Each structure stands twice: as structure tokens, then as C-alpha cells.
Amino acid sequence: MKHWTEGFDDDDADEPLVRPYTITSGRTTPERDDLTLITLVTAIPEVSSEAGHGLRRMQPEHRTILALCKGPMAVAEVASALDLPVTVTKILIGDLIEAGQVRARPPLAFAQAGGFPDMTILEAVRDGLRKL
């Protein structure tokens, strides 16, 4: 897959910038505000036949996200694997969530602790940074 910024210095500089815009059907901001860089995305294995028909109308990047997210994967990792900006990736993931093909959840450490990180982890990070 060609990176969307390749060719900035070429005469075809317009083409790479148009692709992310067309992938998202002209949307420039994600509709969901709950998708962060560390939100974990997982594909739902049992997709109904009705949702399967919708998959044919999706962009290739949608199908790539489904393939990548067979196991939990962070939004930032998905964006990196797609070689697309995070905002574009969030829009695509939002489409898949709306279609019922993926689930998104915060990382377990935060979800289980009621939204706050475990103090032992923070202390270990602090101690590690001090040793540097």
C-alpha cells in the first residue's frame, strides 16, 4: 500500500492527498469521541450475512482493519499498519463499529481500575525513569 504522503515533491502531489479524503467519503473528523490512541479494537468473528453484504461496499482499508483486528489491537497500531493518519483510521474504525463488525474498548488496566491506572505501574515507571 502506498503511503498517502509519498510524492509531495512530485508533479502528482495531489493524488496522495486525495486518497484519505476519498477513503472516508469526504469526512474529515471522526464521529466517535471515545476512540483514543490506546483504545483496543477487536473484530467480531461471527458477522451476520447482512453485515457481510455491506463488507463488499467497504473500502479495502476496512477489510484490512478486520484482518488486523482478529486479536485486540490499539488504534495507533492499526493506523501504523495502514500507513494512514490516525484521524482517517478512527473514521474507518467508527464505520466498522457502526456496522457491528468490530468492538472497541479501553485497555483492561484502565477499565478494571475504574478509569485510573494502577499505582504500582506508575511507581515502577517513575523508578525506571529515575534510574535513567
Image (cartoon, helix red, strand yellow):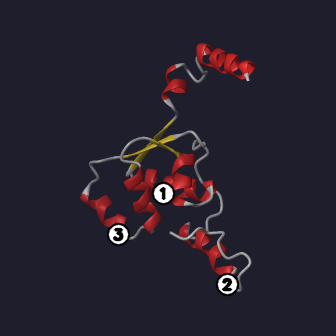
Nearer the N terminus, badge 3 or badge 2? 2
Note whether residue 125 is visible. Answer: yes
Nearer the N terminus, badge 3 or badge 1? 3
User: Looking at the image, which residue is at 39% across and 70% down?
Assistant: 57
Q: Is residue 126 left or right of residue 110?
A: right
Q: Which mark is residue 95?
A: 1
Mark 1–mark 2 Cα distance, whole angstroms, equals 29 Å
Q: Is residue 66 left or right of residue 113?
A: left
Mark 3–mark 2 Cα distance, whole angstroms, equals 29 Å
User: Looking at the image, which residue is at 72% across and 23% down?
Assistant: 129
Nearer the N terminus, badge 1 or badge 2? 2
Instruction: Classify mark 1: residues with Cα within 10 Å, few (<14), some (14-19) or many (20+).
Output: some
Asked if residue 24 is positioned above or below residue 68 in the image, the reply reads below
- Amino acid marked by disc 2: Asp
Asked if residue 39 is positioned above or below residue 127 in the image, the reply reads below
Q: Nearer the viewer, residue 41 or 97?
A: 41
For label 2, the residue is 12
Q: Percent from the top left, x then y, of residue 33?
A: 61, 45
For label 3, the residue is 56
Q: Is residue 128 left or right of residue 64?
A: right
CB contact under 8 Å: marks 1 and 2: no
Q: Percent from the top left, x then y, of residue 132?
A: 73, 24
Asked if residue 75 is positioned above or below residue 22 in the image, the reply reads above
